[in-house]
Amino acid sequence: MYKSFLIKYAEIGVKGKNRYLFEDRLCEQIRYALTRCEGEFEVTKSQGRIYVNALSAFDFDETVENLKTVFGVTGICPVVSVEDEGFEKLCQDVVAYMDQVYPDKNITFKVEARRARKNYPKNSMEINCDIGEALLNAFPEIRVDVHKPDVLLRIEIREKINIYSVVIPGPGGLPIGTNGKGMLLLSGGIDSPVAGYMISKRGVKIDAVYFNAPPYTSDRAKQKVIDLARIVSKYSGPINLHIINFTDIQLYIYDKCPHDELTIIMRRYMMRIAEEIAKENGCLGLITGESIGQVASQTMQSLMATNDVCTMPVYRPLIGFDKQEIVEVSEKIDTYETSILPYEDCCTIFVAKHPVTKPNLNVIRIHERNLDEKIDELVKTALETDEVIEIKYQ
Ligand code: ATP
Ligand code: MG
């Protein structure tokens, strides 16, 4: 029975010029999500509203599922749109609507009419009363409750008349592309895909970088990261994934630095390289999946040592999350099953038995000097290995 959806979005902060940007980006992302659905659709802006109209047969559930991935959408309302053919006809249409959508009439309702077209012969109050009456006459069991109705039935008088009462919650957030771009350090773990999801929820477009360590890490591990990026791109829009060969840098650090500081020094080089790539690609910040105290490299002292090499802001949206809370989000966004596949990653291979948990920044800086001879060259070479994969969810 539905051929259209009215898309609700929060309008806070999107007044004036920003509003167009916001709405255009939202339409763009809705179109991107709909490319994954059977059927043909048009996405239109009209009188401060966004509509998705089906131009062919479509799968309702699949369409709703995909619309739910669009940041900025707060509600998805399946709408019945009817021509204005007089009030009598409207009452019949509304009765038919309620009959189909609510087979069980043991419910309370309230009508809320809005006129965008003020030349309609009845005002909103009259529409509310008269449609209410038509429903009470049609269904003896149904009752009115103006305070806490089970069903809030909306009638919008526009060029056409929209009838709707179901609001399916969207993910909220802001449309991708309204807040610049960030570079996600994406590993094959549970945390970083969730971090990418959370930052992109705030309207940030993301690119990603993965530090690969062949032959110590396998192609399966790399494929796992590609798969994770693909799932994140369902929400974030297309991602350029940079794959950097990090092996020689790791081996060099292993050779020259105290083993209990390997992870910290390695992480400092990851951040430095990520920042280089971020700058080259117009990113305004780095994003990681770090959370205080989760592992030795994420104590306050370790984070300080890692952060020390960054000049860009580093966004760590999971910083105050417990592991279980992160797992819950990863299950919700569907990255969990992929994240727990047991492939080796570059950090686990070179990890020390007893890594420092409270690194001293000055000591780290001094030990890093052991790398002076070759490290610049190795970083340069690593940057040259950059393999960029364009990732889209389709
Ligand atoms: P994750 O589950 O995201 O792998 P983690 O708990 O394993 O995180 P670490 O291995 O200490 O934690 O990594 C901390 C953060 O550093 C990750 O969340 C990620 O953002 C980044 N990171 C770690 N390893 C890599 C890698 N091989 N490539 C890119 N980024 C990485
Ligand atoms: Mg990891």
Image (tube, rainbow, N blue to C red):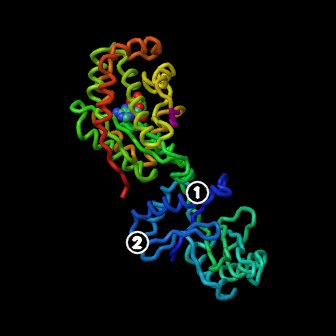
In terms of secondary structure, where does tag 2 sit? loop
Left/right of residue 86 with respect to residue 206 in the rendered view: right
Q: With respect to residue 118, does 311 lie above or below?
A: above
**Does label 2 point to a residue whose CB lies under 8 Å from ligand 1?**
no
Q: Quadrant of the C terminus?
A: bottom left
Q: Which mark is residue 173?
A: none
| Mark in the foreground, 1 or 2 | 1
At x 47% / y 38%, what residue is drawn? 326
Residue 56 sits in quarter: bottom left
Residue 364 percent across, percent down from the top left: 42, 15
Q: Nearer the viewer, residue 78 or 347?
A: 347
Which callout, 1 or 2, points at the residue further toward the start of the chain? 1
Residue type for callout 2: Gly
- Location of mark 2 (residue): 39
Residue 224 percent across, percent down from the top left: 30, 43
At x 69% / y 65%, what residue is drawn? 149
Q: With respect to residue 321, does 330 lie above or below?
A: below
Q: Nearer the viewer, residue 246 or 109?
A: 246
- The question of residue 314 being in magenta is answered with yes
Q: Main secondary structure of the magenta part?
A: loop
At x 38% / y 31%, what residue is drawn? 273
Left/right of residue 295 with respect to residue 22 in the rendered view: left
Residue 233 percent across, percent down from the top left: 41, 51
At x 63% / y 55%, what residue is drawn? 18
Q: Which residues are magenta?
A: 312-318
Residue 10 percent across, percent down from the top left: 63, 56
Q: Which mark is residue 22?
A: 1
Left/right of residue 55 with respect to residue 154 in the rendered view: left
- The question of residue 374 being in magenta is answered with no
Residue type for callout 1: Phe
Q: CA distance from mark 1 to mark 2?
A: 26 Å
